[in-house]
Amino acid sequence: MNSKSNASTIQEIINDRMTESEIKSILSKGEGLTIEFKSSFNTEVIETLAAFANAMGGSVIIGISHELKLIGVSINSESIQNWLNEIKSKTSPSILPDAEIVTMGLKKIVVLSIQEFPIKPVALKGKYFKRVANSNHALSTQEVVNMHLQSFNTSWDYHIKLIL
């Protein structure tokens, strides 16, 4: 299966309520353009969500170790809301992912999913990222400018003509 069809299949699974067997299927495929696993919620989760928002969208599954082992997360009644508030306050423009808690055996994992954002680029505390294969890369100044212009379907030529 090529990476584009693999990515769309994974996104289709995540857009619905996920089951334990679907999570296991995603785990067997590993990280990629639209999937990232994290053992806990931290700034790297927000960085990845910003990178996904600047690309084709994606999901971060929290409670999975680097070795792709189910470790689960400890959450209380306000954990998810606190995480969403932190994501919203640290990104610009603010992004707000969908959140889902999936119980696997006696453990819980959290899936944070974000669609491609229409106004780009999305920054995390003033830094911009893009998703390349299975990792996040910082955007250069030129990439930030081009991404911004593309999100408004314009170019430098248009702006230069306005000045003249």
Image (cartoon, helix red, strand yellow):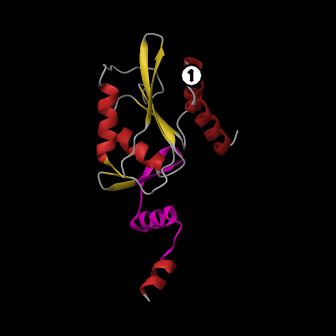
Q: Residue at x 49, y 64 (%)?
A: 152
Q: Position of residue 90 (x, y in %)?
A: 30, 46
Q: Position of residue 127 (x, y in %)?
A: 33, 55
* Residue 17 occupies quadrant: top right
One can see residue 36 in this view: no
Residue, far right: 1
Tally of numbered tags: 1
Q: Position of residue 61 (x, y in %)?
A: 46, 30
- Say whether residue 29 is left or right of residue 155: right
One can see residue 45 in this view: yes
Q: Is residue 16 above or below residue 149?
A: above
Q: Which residue does the numbered mark 1 point to in the structure image?
A: 24
- State yes or no: residue 152 in magenta: yes
- Say whether residue 14 is left or right of residue 1: left
Q: Residue at x 42, y 14 (%)?
A: 107
Residue, far bottom: 164
Q: Residue at x 60, y 25 (%)?
A: 25
**10 Å crowding of disc 1: few (<14), some (14-19), many (20+):** some
Q: Position of residue 82 (x, y in %)?
A: 29, 31
Q: Is residue 18 above or below residue 119?
A: above
Residue, far top: 106
Query: In what quadrant of the picture does the C terminus appear?
Result: bottom left
* Residue 140 occupies quadrant: bottom left
**Quick one: 138 or 80, which is closer to the camera?**
80
* Residue 70 occupies quadrant: top left
Q: Is residue 84 above or below residue 27?
A: below
Secondary structure under the numbered disc 1 in the rendered image: helix
Residues shaded magenta: 129-156
- State yes or no: residue 39 in magenta: no
Query: In what quadrant of the picture does the N terminus appear?
Result: top right
